[in-house]
Image: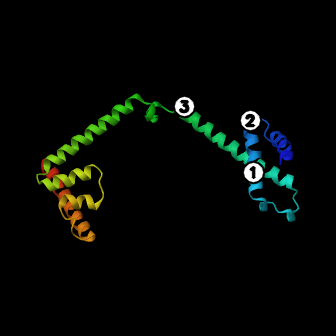
Amino acid sequence: MCLLLDPLSNEIARKFPNTDMQLISDGVTDALLEYCTDPNKFDPSRGVPLDRFLAQAAWRNVANIVRGEQRRKAREIKASSAPAEELVELDVTAGNLLQEQERRRQRQARELMQMVENLVDKRILELRLAGERRTEEFARVMNISHLPKERQRREVKRAKDRIDKFLERSKKGKR
């Protein structure tokens, strides 16, 4: 294989004249390693010599690498010319916007919690606002953990639906 590395690298370098030699070397090396890993890919009955088979595989590898590099550079150029509003992670005001959204979310959660008077319903709402989805947690709060799982699911869903309807009616009454 060492005998093929330099001649293949030189041949592929001629086909890709303005390409970094490291990229060419990577493509050629990958072609040789792929052949070593699975020599059955080469079929001598097709009339193509091994060196031509490897040259074609190396050419494809380098072409793929070059295309990938071109796409990467295009993304970098696009990102560097994008307006600051599109680069949220680099925008100083993005943090302020995220903080404002979080404050608004917390205020809305407090308002919802104030509407609910029943302590169990409050705890269910707290779990939902925290993103909890496991029936077991709601069943524990509702003190129905002793029931079969399917019955727990139904009871938890009923409680959630009841709270949702109550909050919906309460919001409409405020308007």
- State the residue at coordinates (18%, 48%): 112
Residue on which disc 3 sits: 80
- Observer-side mark, 2 or 3, equals 2
Q: Whole-percent x and y of residue 97?
A: 34, 34
Q: Nearer the viewer, residue 127 or 80?
A: 127
Specify the label residue 20 is tagged with. Answer: 2
Q: Residue furthest left?
A: 117
On screen, residue 95 above or below 4: above
Asked if the residues shown at circle 2 and circle 3 are in contact, with their CB atoms under 8 angstroms apart, the answer is no
The residue lying toward the viewer, choosing from 111 and 39, is: 39
> In front: mark 1 or mark 2?
1
- Occupied quadrant, residue 5: top right
The dot on residue 33 is 1
Mark 3: which amino acid? Ser
The quadrant holding residue 99 is top left
**Percent position of residue 31, x then y:** 76, 50
